[in-house]
Amino acid sequence: MQNEIPSQSQFQSIPRQSIVAPKLESYQTDGFFDELVDEHTMARPDAEMLVQLINRIPAGELLRRQRSIERSLYQMGITFTVYSDNSGTEKIMPFDVIPRIVSAMLWHHIEAGLRQRIRALNRFLSDIYGDQAIVNDGIIPKELIDSCPAFLPQCVGLKPPRDVWCHITGTDLVRDNTGAVYVLEDNLRCPSGVSYVLQNRHVMKRNFPQVFGASRVRPVNDYPSRLYGMLRSMVPWEIDNPTVAVLTPGVFNSAYYEHSFLAQQMGVELVEGRDLVVQDDFVYMRTTDGLQQVDVIYRRVDDTFLDPEVFRKDSALGVAGLMRAYRAGNVALANAPGTGVADDKVIYAFVPQMIDYYLGEQPILANVPTYVCQQEEDRNYVLDHLDELVVKAAGESGGYGILIGPHATDDERAEFAAKIRENPRNYIAQPTLQLSRVPTLANDTIEGRHVDLRPYILYSGPDDVWVMPGGLTRVALKKGSLVVNSSQGGGSKDTWVVAEAGQPVASSNS
């Protein structure tokens, strides 16, 4: 590991052309936009040292390091659950050893777009559970809101502290064949995956310290402290030492590792619904010393399971009376209940209009062009062009409920056509984007695989928005696949955002 890249003196002896643009040997872009190399497989400016490293290390050594990293991840308990897999539900998150690099200029564009988007979405949530001006002014059809399964009438009239609904967001981004960035979807309920970002970074720094240190990568390891600081700031009254807890559904939840990891990193309690009780509209945690008041709850329990008094009466995961305490202003919740209406894939189609309506601005980051099947003209187009489009169920996630038209059979397209006609509100369609790729280790060779990116955003108000410099790069490990979800055979990569002058740079030693 000590000789993984040339020293500074060795760099000086290399012809300048090879430093400026080393070629990734034997790699083929196959006509796709690649994040590390151009169409001639010459390294993009910020990827020069990484490409040199890849050229110098035999694929067998890269594979050995990847296997070592995977063993480390497994030993740390970094797993997720796939309930439909007959070969076993507990899986290690597949990991690829070749990182994705994001230039400082591109990141500046992404960060500005995400700040803008989350401000508009928060305004939308406040409005839609209040006066519904955006509906009354005809920007979003009322029937789309009323028919949205994630719109919760029980949350109408809620007033979260500081009018912040979406404290923690994970927004999925993709790039097309021109390199343009698009928003694929928003995740405002209980966005997961940030623990993989932090642990991926930890093992990558340990296994590739020199190239990491030389690449001027921005740090991500301050996420837990920033998250904790934001949660503490949510307390609706003055208190010196508020009690913060992470509410988990329990050990059988697919993201339980992340819940426990974040609680441990923040130094707060990890609790289940059975550990909490509401008395006199205050929330208390059962401890060996008796009841202790809880001031802030980072909830990783879905909306309708939070409180059996208000939502699902059969829920054993939530806390009876929690919504009473919340409405009374005696506990803060992140994220606020009801945020799922902004996750709905049909409502997603109207985010550009939200940005214009609430902010008076043009979107910095564009949506993927979207056809709403509830609208007759869009529906007819979709039914006539199923062989060209990607069709998605509005309420599904994890790569489920998707038809990729160009790769589907006639029978599969006919099945989706029937579903669309039966329940058009539940479907949208989008063009089949040629997603960007990143070189990825495929046994003993390096091949291009399609990727997306999920940055994480902490929102304390319109003037206090922090975007993690990087995020979870998800990679479709199956050759030719466009589905990056881990439940569908996808994996993850470390994401290196290059620092501008004056910005903090991550240390390779910590």
Image (cartoon, helix red, strand yellow):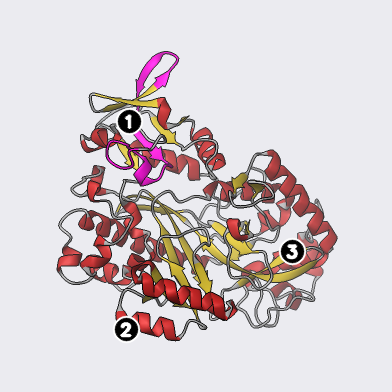
Q: Which mark is residue 377?
A: 2
Q: Earlier in the sequence, mark 2 or mark 1?
A: 1
Q: Earlier in the sequence, mark 2 or mark 3?
A: 2
Residue plotted at (30% across, 77% down): 375
> Is disc 3 surrounded by few (<14), some (14 to 19) or many (20+) residues within 10 Å?
many
Q: Which mark is residue 57?
A: none
Q: Are marks 2 and 3 in contact (CB under 8 Å)?
A: no
Relative to residue 413, is residue 57 depicted above or below? Answer: above
The answer for how far apart the CA atoms under marks 1 and 3 are is 46 Å
Residue plotted at (33% across, 42% down): 312
Q: Which mark is residue 441?
A: 3
The answer for how far apart the CA atoms under marks 2 and 1 are is 49 Å
The type of residue carrying mark 1 is: Asp
| Residue 293 lies in the magenta stretch | yes
Q: Quadrant of residue 135?
A: bottom left
Residue 403 image offset from top left, x and y in percent: 52, 72
Looking at the rendering, the stretch of residues picked out in magenta corresponds to 286-313
Which-is-in-front pick, marks 2 and 1? 2
Q: Which mark is residue 295?
A: 1
Residue 409 image offset from top left, x and y in percent: 59, 78
Q: Identify the element where label 1 is drawn.
A: loop
Relative to residue 389, is residue 48 depicted above or below? Answer: above
